[in-house]
Amino acid sequence: QKLMLALLGLTLVVLVATLGLARWSFERGFLDYVNALEQTRLTTISEGLARVYVDNGNSWQEIDSNLLKRRLNRVPGGHPPPRHMRPNQPRKRHPPPLGPKHFRSPPTALFDLQGNNLAGTIFSNSERESIVVPIMVNGQSVALLKSEPKRKFDSSIETAFSRQQW
């Protein structure tokens, strides 16, 4: 009987350890996925900022800082439809399926090649921990986009998905 209780106890310890490891592995993998999406977001933003840079005579000088901030804070599903598709009269209000209030972009900043902040949030992460995407024009880097990687779930969708998996 003591042997049976010992085996039962050992089985419970192994089960709890396995479930804990599976949970930790899921959370790490999901955060890696969310950070990969952030890398993709920054790449898309960098392409638009490269056009802004070229349109401004290959310079960051004299570019409206509000324009840069708006571009840095773009989120999935957060850009308006093209002007020709917007109706002139008010539309009925329907909640958007997934809009900017459901996705919060992490602190994002635009830096020139000397490390000067051109726009965006300055955050405390070290260089090694930042997600960094260069802004390329004619095959050369003209600036860097930096963003903080996520270390925890903070949007309602991410949290709901994590709970569902648990």
Image (cartoon, rainbow, N blue to C red):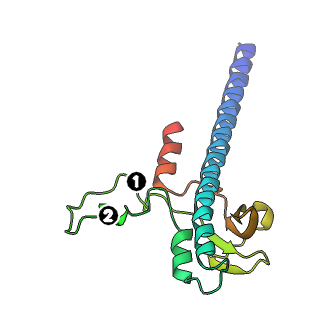
Residue 82 appears in the figure? yes
Q: Judge the density around disc 2: few (<14), some (14-19), many (≥20) Cα neighbours within 10 Å.
A: few
Q: Considering the numbered disc 2 on the image, is that residue within a helix, a strand or a loop?
A: helix
Q: Quadrant of the C terminus?
A: top right
The residue that label 2 is drawn on is 84
Q: Position of residue 36 (x, y in %)?
A: 64, 50
Q: In the image, which disc is placed on residue 23?
A: none
Q: Are marks 2 and 1 in contact (CB under 8 Å)?
A: no
Amino acid of disc 2:
His
Q: Judge the density around disc 1: few (<14), some (14-19), many (≥20) Cα neighbours within 10 Å.
A: few
Distance CA(mark 2)–CA(mark 1): 23 Å
Tell which of 31 and 110 is nearer to you: 110
Q: Considering the numbered disc 1 on the image, is that residue within a helix, a strand or a loop?
A: loop
Tell which of 77 and 59 is nearer to you: 59
Residue 98 falls left or right of residue 54: left
Q: Residue at x 20, y 68 (%)?
A: 90
Pick out the residue farthest to the bottom.
Answer: 62
The residue that label 1 is drawn on is 98
Q: Position of residue 160 (x, y in %)?
A: 47, 47
Q: Position of residue 141 (x, y in %)?
A: 75, 67
Q: Residue at x 74, y 16 (%)?
A: 2
Residue 125 appears in the figure? no
Q: Position of residue 29 (x, y in %)?
A: 66, 42
Amino acid of disc 1:
Leu
Q: Quadrant of residue 136?
A: bottom right
Q: Quadrant of residue 100?
A: bottom left
Would you place residue 8 above or below residue 33 in this image? above
